[in-house]
Image: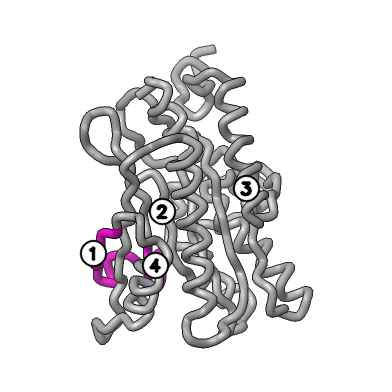
Amino acid sequence: MKNYRNNRFVQPVAADAVGLSRFLLDWLTSAATAGFIPLELAPVCPLGTCSIIATAHQNKVVSALRGTEVVADATNVLALESAVRRQRDGFPGETLHFSAVHRHVRAQEVPDMPGYSPHFSVLGLTSAGRDIGSFDFEKENLWRHIHFYQSFLGEKMRISPIKLRLISLDGKSGNNRMFDMMHGFLQEKLFDLDIEVTAAARKEQAYYCGVQFKIVIPNHGGGEMEIADGGFTDWTRQLTGNGKERLLISGIGLELLYKMTNGLL
């Protein structure tokens, strides 16, 4: 009883369970309609999934027994599943899109604020495919992810204004041709979306490669909130040893969004 009262990892969610479940299902259904195959992930994944595939320190993950850890980032697991399937099928030209709503558990300290918890529900999206030249894979799938978030937030939830924060992760030369191509393409495709351009040194952000994006919405305090985040990674290239493989990942904090729009923050 004492452990249950005091252990931050075991407390139930401070939100209406039925309302939150409906909200999560609505997003997952919409992702499936947009072509992202929905998966129900296991609550655990191989030990090292976050620290080896990505860059998160193992101390931020709840490590378990039998060679596993509690899932802290569903996109890491979706990358594993993408690599397994694409390698098994001979690296087909068709892009493999996955989606998953999953309750993540993070071991680092969380803000002592209403609505924040060490476990929370996130929608993760991944698009895994092959390099087809001219950054065509990158352009098409970056637009797919961003357009999905923009459509749901703007058309279904009536949130306005929505801003895209596009971040250039410069390489050693400081010349990011990939970013320039993505920026120009998105300006044409998303002409009604406010695009804010910024830059970060690659050494400051080792999680993504080349381009990162954030979806920014207003919060009730008059400020703004970065509710979704994504970018390109080299994870499937690492996992399969195939240099032609490409992967775009993204995620949106659905539980935080639900709490914000229902006055729970």
Between marks 2 and 4 in the image, the one whose residue lies nearer the viewer:
4
Q: Amino acid at mark 3?
A: Ala
| Residue under the image location 64 percent in, 46 percent down | 44
Q: Secondary structure at mark 1?
A: strand
Q: Nearer the viewer, residue 101 or 189?
A: 189
Question: What secondary structure is marked by label 3?
Answer: strand
Look at mark 3 in the image and give the residue it sits on: 100
Mark 3 vs 4, N-terminal side: 3
Distance from Cα at disc 3 to Cα at disc 4: 25 Å
The residue under label 1 is which amino acid type?
A: Thr
User: Mark 1 and mark 2: span between their CA atoms?
Assistant: 14 Å
Closer to viewer: mark 1 or mark 4: 4
Q: Position of residue 131 (x, y in %)?
A: 56, 82
Q: Is residue 118 visible?
A: no
According to the image, label 1 marks what residue?
Answer: 198
Q: Residue furthest top?
A: 1
Instruction: Write the start and end of the magenta stretch as one range.
Output: 195-212
Residue 55: image quadrant is bottom left
Nearer the observer, 228 or 8: 228
Which residue does the image show at 48% across and 33% down from the upper left? 255
Q: Amino acid at mark 2?
A: Asp
The image's mark for residue 112 is none
Tell me the residue at 41%/48% (across/down): 228
To which residue does mark 2 refer?
A: 229
The crowding category of the residue bearing disc 3, from other C-alpha atoms within 10 Å (few below 14, some 14 to 19, many at least 20), is: many
Q: Is residue 50 magenta?
A: no
Q: Position of residue 90 (x, y in %)?
A: 76, 80
Which badge, 3 or 2, comes first in the chain's sequence? 3
Q: Categorize mark 2 by other alpha carbons within 10 Å: few (<14), some (14-19), many (20+).
A: some
**Mark 1–mark 3 contact, CB under 8 Å?**
no
